[in-house]
Image (tube, rainbow, N blue to C red):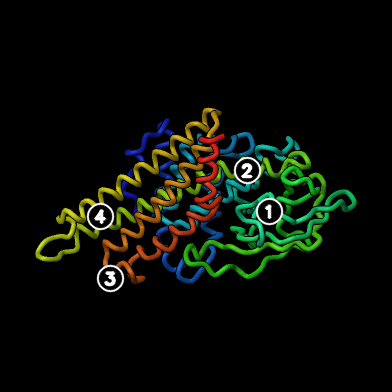
Amino acid sequence: MALSITPADRLLPTEEAEELLHLVRDIADSELAPRVTAAEHDGIFFREELRTLGKAGLLSLPYDEEHGGGGQPYEVYLQALEELAGAWLSVGISVSVHSLACYPLATYGSDEQKQRWLPDMLAGDLLGAYCLSEPQSGSDAAALVTRAVPDGDGFAVTGTKAWITHGGVADFYNVMVRTSDDGSRGISCLLVPGDAAGLSSAPPERKMGAKASRTAQVILDGVHVDRDRLLGAQGQGFAIAMTALDAGRLGIAACAVGLAQAALDAAAAYAKERRQFGKAIGEFQGMQFMLADMATAVSAARALYLAAARRRDRGLPFAVEAAKAKLFATDAAMKVTTDTVQVFGGYGYVEDFPVERYMREAKVLQIVEGTNQVQRMVIGRSLTH
């Protein structure tokens, strides 16, 4: 079911952007919505659907046209992402993570590196992953221990990365590695090919929700990486990782709004259909107030991520605004999806309706790309330092 907010309802900067959103919705309706229930139930990864999105130019929207990007402002890209997530959250997460994985090369790579690898990434021919977290270092990312030591004309990388979206199925990995013991200044970013000798993945994690999204540990056992795959300067990796996450958090915020909007639409439709005590339950004031609060939260979350995106598009600082958007939107998604299950009553607790899945899926959004406790730290420090 398409989201109730239409492309015409959105405040888009150009007619081209509105046409793009119509294309996204058509693909979501025809290619994603018919497959989501079975794929999520069985945990089937959706590589072909991602290829379809790549061919339509939807995996490269915020990047420069010079290397095959869509050349769209972030406020347009995020609304396209919201549409995709509203149809199938796992796909929205994959698109957001792939965009995040393209960021280090697109932003910090040399012209030669960009010409060599970026076009295939942006076309979706190469699917990306972003490897920062480790089993013992999640929120404390600077404590990572995966190490790259000199090895001939490059590096030998050994360590384990955890909670990696596309782990085991990605064609390239942005791997944050330790090249010295100088804390956060000793971290570098390497572009590791997915078929590198010594690179493997653990079995996929058995998750509460977003089961079709592949999440797995990535294991590097003496993987040789040529020096020309170092992105940015040696020791610049932590700065690359953090600036990438600022943009990635907006992607997760948009995904959360798409999921929350889908849940709200389901709740509102059910409230008009379900009858108790001789009338539709939507006619009861208590139900109307619940739906009103849900709708307000969704609109407020959308406004927050768009405000942050517009700052990014104008070259203004947006890290704190991204943290606010990610925090509020994902908390809102958790509340809205939980309330939607309540609207459905017993029917909300069974798999006959998608709303129990929405509730399970919402939880992960409060954790990925920096937990919401980390977002509060970012916001709090901006107010007290």
Rendered location of residue 268, percent (x, y): 25, 55
Q: Nearer the viewer, residue 286 or 9?
A: 286
Q: Disc 2 residue type?
A: Met
Q: Which mark is residue 268?
A: 4
75 relative to 99, above or below: above
Going from the N terminus, do you reach mark 2 or mark 1 first? 1
Q: Disc 1 residue type?
A: Phe
Q: Disc 3 residue type?
A: Gly
The residue that disc 3 covers is 346
Q: Which mark is residue 120?
A: none
- Image side of residue 271 versus residue 376, left or right: left
Q: Are marks 1 and 4 in contact (CB under 8 Å)?
A: no
Residue occupying the point 54% across, 48% down: 374
Q: Nearer the viewer, residue 28 or 352?
A: 352
Residue occupying the point 70% across, 58% down: 194
The residue that disc 1 covers is 172
Rendered location of residue 143, percent (x, y): 70, 53
- Image side of residue 327 versus residue 202, left or right: left
Going from the N terminus, do you reach mark 1 or mark 3 first? 1
Task: Give the Cα separation between the discs numbered 3 and 4.
Answer: 16 Å
Task: Give the Cα separation between the discs numbered 2 and 1.
Answer: 19 Å
Q: Nearer the viewer, residue 370 or 105?
A: 370
Q: Residue furthest right?
A: 152
